[in-house]
Image (cartoon, rainbow, N blue to C red):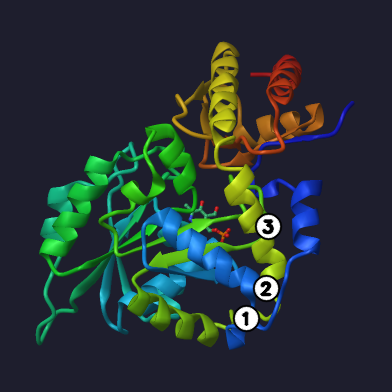
């Protein structure tokens, strides 16, 4: 059998030879002293791609979100966020533990959005008794909502609601280039009314490490201090930043292929009885298992040579990425069909 087809996440992709070559020749310096020309260039290009004044290179999407929360809030403040958001579900409560904020969840609608009236109703002003709501966190694309791409008009309306209550808005745009590709608009336009936006290099853009946090000059200056406090000041980080510059030039336009591959995967899965996949808008396929047990299916997939992850009691997730071609999808579907012949339902 050929190699495993790894659809667990778009974080599993490996840097290409050309990306590695760009990394190996990167000019570097001590970035904590502000001396690394490649990091400086990466941050400038990221800011411009996202339509913000400034940007900060950080180790991960989780660190970008945490630095954003630390920078927008003070201890005791409340942040509003979706109950399916990555910050709430998968970041170990860092906003509470390290930023000292109350995380107040609002129900995410199936399309990844929040109800505007719910945001307005939840927002509260600080007084003798109550903490103040200081920050609204949005996510686009929305991971747990099947990679949903949230349209600009919805983003703008939620941001306007938050601003009307004197809250700042942070966008977890780990996959914002997937959203921008699906919606056919620039990433900067999607993030236009958000005060800060983070995105990951190590997902759809195919880099080994890193994320960027973008915002106003003043915000990023404060964020830089918070990154240092978390131990995230990196030295000759240009070696890693060079991968990001390579990705900006070569790996954004190709994201559309990942979306086509995800659609083909979902279409194929739908024809196999036991699965109810979403209709993917981007590169994330989530499929409910309607016959048999999820654990048995994941084991059978793995035995047949396809890796997926559990995404709920009876739900699995598969993500397309730069290392997955259309023929890998066809082969994955053949292997899954073999698994369907094996698992008793
Ligand atoms: C929406 C979203 N935000 C943030 C992150 C965190 O990124 P990292 O794994 O780089 O910390 C992820 C990772 O999967 C994500 O899907």
Residue 31 numbered mark, or none: 1
Q: Secondary structure at mark 1?
A: helix
Please count the marks in the image.
3
Q: Few, some or many C-alpha atoms within 10 Å of disc 3 (few <14, some 14-19, many ≥20)?
A: many
The residue at 58%/19% (across/down) is: 264
Image quarter of residue 7: top right
> 139 and 40: which one is in front?
40
Residue 216 left/right relative to 308: left
The tag earlier along the polypeptide, 2 or 3, is 2
Q: Position of residue 239 (x, y in %)?
A: 72, 67
The residue at 63%/41% (across/down) is: 309
Q: Few, some or many C-alpha atoms within 10 Å of disc 2 (few <14, some 14-19, many ≥20)?
A: many
The tag earlier along the polypeptide, 3 or 1, is 1
Work out whether residue 308 can be spotted.
yes
The residue under label 3 is: 243
Q: CA distance from mark 2 to mark 1?
A: 7 Å
Task: Note whether ligand 1 is within 8 Å of mark 1.
Answer: no
Tell me whether the residue at label 2 lies in contact with that at label 1, contact meaning CB atoms closer than 8 angstroms: yes
Q: Secondary structure at mark 2?
A: loop
Residue 118 left/right relative to 187: left
Work out whether residue 343 can be spotted.
no
The C terminus sits in image quarter: top right
The residue under label 2 is: 237
């Amino acid at each position: 059998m050929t190699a495993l087809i790894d659809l667990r996440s778009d974080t599993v992709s490996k840097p290409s030879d050309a990306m590695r070559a760009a990394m190996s020749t990167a000019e570097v310096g001590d970035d904590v002293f502000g001396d690394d020309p490649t990091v400086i260039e990466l941050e400038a290009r990221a800011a411009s791609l996202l339509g913000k004044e400034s940007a900060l290179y950080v180790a991960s999407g989780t660190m970008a979100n945490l630095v954003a929360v630390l920078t927008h809030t003070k201890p005791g403040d409340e942040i509003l966020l979706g109950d399916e958001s990555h910050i709430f579900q998968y970041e170990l409560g860092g906003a509470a533990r390290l930023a000292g904020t109350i995380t107040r969840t609002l129900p995410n609608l199936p399309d990844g959005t929040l109800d505007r009236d719910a945001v307005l109703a939840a927002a509260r002003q600080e007084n003798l008794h109550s903490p103040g709501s200081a920050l609204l966190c949005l996510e686009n694309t929305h991971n747990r909502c099947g990679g949903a791409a949230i349209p600009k008009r919805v983003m703008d309306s939620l941001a306007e609601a938050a601003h009307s209550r004197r809250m700042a808005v942070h966008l977890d745009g780990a996959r914002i280039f997937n959203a921008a590709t699906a919606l056919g608009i620039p990433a900067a336009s999607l993030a236009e009314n958000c005060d800060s936006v983070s995105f990951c290099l190590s997902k759809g853009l195919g880099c080994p490490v890193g994320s960027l946090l973008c915002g106003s000059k003043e915000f990023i200056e404060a964020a830089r201090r918070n990154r240092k406090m978390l131990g995230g000041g990196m030295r000759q980080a240009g070696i890693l930043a060079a991968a990001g510059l390579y990705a900006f030039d070569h790996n954004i336009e190709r994201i559309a292929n990942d979306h086509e591959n995800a659609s083909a995967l979902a279409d194929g899965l739908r024809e196999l009885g036991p699965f109810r996949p979403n209709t993917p808008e981007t590169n994330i396929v989530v499929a409910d298992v309607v016959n048999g047990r999820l654990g048995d299916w994941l084991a059978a997939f793995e035995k047949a040579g396809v890796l997926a992850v559990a995404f709920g009691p009876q739900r699995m997730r598969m993500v397309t990425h730069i290392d997955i071609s259309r023929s890998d999808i066809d082969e994955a579907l053949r292997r899954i069909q073999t698994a369907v012949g094996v698992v008793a339902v």
